[in-house]
């Protein structure tokens, strides 16, 4: 895990210090989906503040993320998050582990921003008063407090992605999983999300094709045909990934 | 969100609770169904007009809003006159006209939020009867409201793209991509809904699920 | 109903509404024909009887909530007590029957042509025969028109609906080629 000095604040976060991270362990996990092997006997542990995951389409990286919160059930092996089984204790795992999807239109559920942020909180049993506080807090945190009463379909793609992220953060998770967060964003919004990501105190595991986003990460993992084939520093793994796919 | 048919205002009807208005409308429609006297029905039409006007809408506005139903009624009246007789036609037109005006008065003075609340209250006994799961049903309706603008926009975009290729008349060229998209989207959407903790665990509402503490303000 | 069912039902309801807002034939002079009733058939053919009917119930809920989701921007409670309400309620049964028959025929699917014919049959039986029965019954009794007259008044619309039924079958075949989806 990396601690950082104030000079580089905003570049790499100090998550471990505030208890904002979890230990995620895959033990010999295989996942079969639609007759294909999506994950092939994967054994790996994640506890760093920042972990990047790269791989070609169909390599299994999205499956890896989804398995962490029990959206995908392994056909063999177990996944635990701070000791809790991702499938058996999915509810508790999802309480502390958020997932931001590629396309905000696939995850925004309510017609109005504030209502959507409240959705996850309601599901986890928060009181109305607490919900109001947390929704306001999450919107403030991302600088989008003014969007609170806006209608979703009037927002731009970048705004929607921030709303989706606010919905995840409102629950105060320890870990946020990102599934190609900048895939649908233009350059300006991509940079905005990059800045948000850098300043995030929560642990972040990021799947991305946008390799520059992962360049400062302490650890990057490369996945190919359902197997982890590289695991090391961003420089080493991204360099290899770029080279292999020239 | 789709714009509701309700209009803002401060009339008596606006201030009446939604459930009462709905019950009143249902009662009125039922009673009127059994009335055959054209004079009584004409009176009902007058009541309907008064109700509609009391919402704050001008007669011109009411006329505009009810243009469609009025046309249908006119056609129906003519058909009845031709196929049966004038008296029956009159009775039918007056009855349906009265009901349409009363229904319009209720629709215009009741917001979607109020109606949603009534709907959710109706879900609870239905759930006890085993007909549905209240939170799932409520979510499904809200999701539909959320997605109508997006899907409509996508339909228009598909149409525009097809027009550029000379396929604007093709029903298949519109419907197939539209449906394929929603089937694909449903997968991710379902994952997102699950990831966000749905369905709520009703046994411990008000308590933080992980720590089982009452949430403290920061 | 699983979360995936909820998503499919809600999205299909949105499609039914969207098909009521986009004109079927862009340059049709006079009456704008929309594809909303085709959307109802598709709900049953693609999602199956239960989910298809559920999608229609969601659309009906939206109408009840005062939203202008029926073709022509119609909505609100007036629809439920008007002469065409039978067709609206009938949509639920239409989707269910079309979906049920599609499921029944699934077991014996052979060539694309046979499949298309079978699905057209399902769409016609559900989306026309059953639907019109409901609409005509309501019209006859609610508007006191009598069954025979209500029948002849309604039957005028069948040619357009026949085209939509066949289109629905063709669309269903193509959609099922592109994505895997079971019928429930």
Image: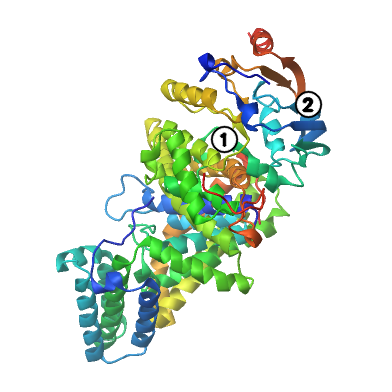
Badge 1 element:
strand
Question: In screen coordinates, is B86 left or right of B125?
Answer: left
SS of the residue at dot 2?
Answer: strand
x and y percentages locating residue B15 in the rendered image:
29, 71
Q: Are marks 1 and 2 in contact (CB under 8 Å)?
A: no
State the residue in front, B159 or B136: B136
Position of residue B143 relative to residue B138, above or below, is above
Percent coordinates x, y for residue A152 in the rendering: 41, 43
Residue C50 circle label? none
Q: Is C139 above or below relative to C28?
A: below
**Dot 1 falls on which chain?**
A
Residue A35 visible from this viewpoint: no
Question: What residue lies at 25% left-to-right and 70% top-to-bottom?
Answer: B70
Q: Is residue A123 left or right of residue C136?
A: right
- The residue nearer to you, when weighing C5 against B166, is C5
Label 1 crowd (10 A; few <14 / some 14-19 / many >=20): many
Q: Residue at x 59, y 20 (%)?
A: A209
User: Depth check: B207 or B12 in front?
Assistant: B207
Do we see residue B60 in this rendering? yes
How many numbered marks have been drawn onto this rendered protein structure? Answer: 2
Name the quadrant containing residue C26.
Answer: top left
Q: Position of residue B48 (x, y in %)?
A: 24, 78
Crowd rating for badge 2 (residues with CA inside 10 Å; few <14, some 14–19, many 20+): some
Q: Which mark is residue A100?
A: 1
Residue A10, given in percent of the width and then of the height, sits at 51, 20
Q: Are marks 1 and 2 on the same chain?
A: yes
Earlier-in-chain disc, 1 versus 2: 2
Name the residue beneath numbered marker 2.
A44
């Amino acid at each position: 895990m990396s601690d950082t000095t104030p000079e580089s604040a905003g570049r790499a976060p100090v998550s471990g210090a505030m208890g904002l991270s979890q230990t995620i362990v895959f033990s010999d996990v295989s996942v079969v989906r639609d007759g294909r092997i999506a994950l092939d006997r994967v054994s790996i542990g994640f506890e760093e503040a920042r972990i990047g995951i790269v791989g070609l389409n169909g390599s299994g990286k999205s499956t890896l993320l989804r398995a962490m919160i029990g959206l995908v059930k392994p056909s063999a092996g177990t996944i635990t998050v701070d000791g809790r089984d991702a499938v058996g204790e999915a509810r508790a795992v999802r309480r502390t582990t958020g997932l931001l999807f590629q396309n905000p239109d696939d995850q925004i559920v309510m017609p109005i921003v504030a209502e959507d942020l409240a959705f996850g909180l309601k599901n986890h049993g928060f009181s109305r008063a607490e919900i109001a506080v947390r929704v306001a807090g999450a919107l403030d945190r991302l600088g989008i407090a003014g969007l609170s009463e806006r209608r979703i379909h009037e927002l731009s793609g970048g705004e929607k992605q921030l709303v989706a992220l606010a919905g995840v953060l409102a629950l105060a998770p320890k870990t946020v999983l990102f599934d190609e967060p900048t895939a649908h964003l233009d350059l300006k919004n991509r940079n905005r999300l990059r800045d948000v990501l850098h300043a995030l105190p929560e642990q972040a595991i990021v799947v991305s094709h946008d390799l520059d986003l992962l360049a400062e990460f302490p650890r990057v993992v490369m996945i190919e045909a359902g197997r982890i084939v590289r695991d090391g520093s961003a420089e080493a793994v991204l360099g290899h990934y770029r080279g292999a796919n020239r | 969100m789709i714009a509701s048919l309700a209009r803002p205002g401060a009339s008596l009807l606006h201030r009446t609770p939604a459930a009462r208005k709905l019950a009143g409308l249902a009662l009125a429609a039922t009673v009127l169904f059994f009335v055959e006297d054209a004079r009584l029905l004409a009176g009902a039409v007058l009541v309907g007009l008064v109700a509609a006007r009391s919402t704050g809408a001008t007669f011109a506005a009411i006329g505009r809003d009810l243009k469609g139903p009025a046309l249908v009624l006119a056609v129906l009246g003519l058909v009845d006159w031709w196929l049966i007789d004038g008296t029956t036609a009159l009775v039918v037109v007056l009855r349906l006209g009265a009901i349409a005006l009363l229904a319009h008065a209720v629709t215009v003075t009741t917001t979607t939020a109020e109606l949603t609340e009534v709907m959710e209250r109706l879900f609870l006994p239905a759930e006890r009867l085993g007909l549905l799961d209240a939170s799932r049903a409520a979510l499904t309706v809200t999701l539909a409201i959320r997605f109508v603008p997006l899907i409509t926009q996508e339909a228009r975009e598909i149409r525009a793209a097809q027009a550029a290729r000379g396929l604007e008349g093709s029903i298949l060229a519109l419907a197939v991509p539209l449906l394929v998209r929603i089937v694909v989207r449903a997968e991710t959407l379902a994952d997102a809904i699950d990831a966000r903790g749905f369905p709520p665990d009703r046994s411990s509402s008000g308590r933080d699920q992980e720590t089982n503490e009452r949430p403290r303000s920061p | 109903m699983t979360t995936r069912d909820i998503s499919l039902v809600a999205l299909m309801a949105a499609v039914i509404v969207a098909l009521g807002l986009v004109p079927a034939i862009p340059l049709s002079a006079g009456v704008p024909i929309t594809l909303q009733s085709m959307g109802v058939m598709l709900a049953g053919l693609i999602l199956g009887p239960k989910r298809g009917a559920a999608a229609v119930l969601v659309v009906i809920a939206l109408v009840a909530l005062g939203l202008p989701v029926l073709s022509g921007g119609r909505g609100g409670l007036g629809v439920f007590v008007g002469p065409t309400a039978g067709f609206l309620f009938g949509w639920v049964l239409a989707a269910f029957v079309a979906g049920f028959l599609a499921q029944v025929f699934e077991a014996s699917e052979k060539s694309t042509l046979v499949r298309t014919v079978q699905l057209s049959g399902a769409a016609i039986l559900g989306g026309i025969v059953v639907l019109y029965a409901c609409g005509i019954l309501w019209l006859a009794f609610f508007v006191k028109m009598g069954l025979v007259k209500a029948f002849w008044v309604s039957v005028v619309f069948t040619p357009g609906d026949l085209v939509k039924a066949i289109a629905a079958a063709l669309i269903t075949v193509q959609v099922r080629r592109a994505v895997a989806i079971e019928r429930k």
